[in-house]
Image (cartoon, grey):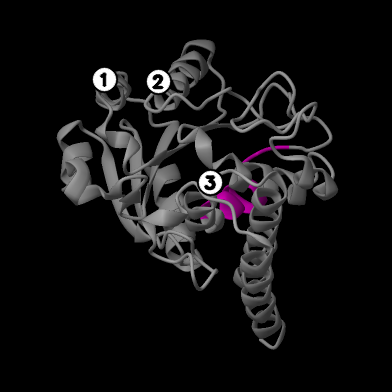
Amino acid sequence: MNKLELMKTANEVRKGIVTAVHSAKSGHPGGSLSAADIYTYLFFEEMNIDPADPKKADRDRFVLSKGHTAPGYYSTLAHRGFFPVEDLTTLRKVGSYLQGHPDMKHIPGVDMSSGSLGQGISAAVGMAISAKLSGDDYRVYTLLGDGEIQEGQVWEASMLAAHRKLDNLVVIVDNNNLQIDGAIDEVNSPYPIDQKFEAFNFHVINIDGNDFDQIDAAFKEAKETKGQPTAIIAKTVKGKGVSFMENQASWHGVAPNDDQYAVAMADLEKVGEALCQK
């Protein structure tokens, strides 16, 4: 995909996020919207995956460590063809396979069940070690929240990843600066995030995580990095694309009502129309 196509796709992913959370009347829109561009790049450009064969042995693996942003994950998978986009409206409903957090047993395209913060990166490290031991060339990607990296297990996993020289592992931190209780630097500051990963012997890349040129360059650099894992610190806007959600911690885990849903979808429709003019 070219940059314009990626931007259009990410906008559709954002529509799916808002629609799913509104339908469920619960969920986590803020961090799903901030990471939508990263989700889109991974699943439409970067990763070796096949919606027709979700469990193919040589596929690249993805672990959503910040599992509460499942609406973003699900919308991306649906638009990539893993399951019908229409099913997004069943999010969190009784009997739906689209649970509030990712479930590897029931959702096509999900490689790891996740949701307990701090644990997803450990699973990703295990997958990357497995590939090394087996001589497989698949790559492993994991997306963390910046509030999540306050968890100690993140750093235990990072220590092991660097010790094992896992150059097949890419850790992405969605640095939107907000968690459920407010600004991360006011709750329990993890800054400087880049220097912490560097101290754990990661190759570190800082980017604007809502800019596809920078996202593209970062993942290409990660592929060229040998002998150490890569951490991409992606500065993003929480609630990106929806005017009243942007940079508001209050939209971490709240669903829009009918009126708010209409405004949000109108915002995204305007973005889509502008992209079609390019």
Tell me how far mark 3 sits from mark 2, CA to CA: 23 Å
Query: Which residue carries the number 3 mark?
Result: 28
Residue underneath mark 2: 122
43 in the magenta segment:
yes
Answer above or below: position of 177 versus 68. Answer: below
**Residue 22 at least partly seen:** yes
Mark 1 highlights which residue?
156
* Residue in front for this viewpoint, 269 or 264: 264
Residue at screen point 66% across, 26% down: 58
Identify residue type, mark 2: Ser
**Quarter of the image holding residue 161?**
top left
Which label sits in the foreground, 3 or 2?
3
The number of numbered badges drawn on the structure is 3
Q: Are marks 1 and 2 in contact (CB under 8 Å)?
A: yes
Determine if the magenta segment contains residue 32: no
| Residue 230, horizontal then vertical, whole percent | 35, 39
Tell whether 166 sits left or right of 83: left
**Which SS does the magenta portion mostly show?**
helix
Tell which circle, 3 or 2, labels the residue nearer the N-terminal end.
3
- Secondary structure, mark 3, is loop
Residue 179 x, y percent position in the rendering: 34, 46
Q: Amino acid at mark 1?
A: Glu
> Closest to the observer: 63 or 202?
63
The N terminus lies in which quarter of the figure?
bottom right
Q: Which residues are drawn in magenta?
A: 38-49
Image quadrant holding the C terminus, namely bottom right
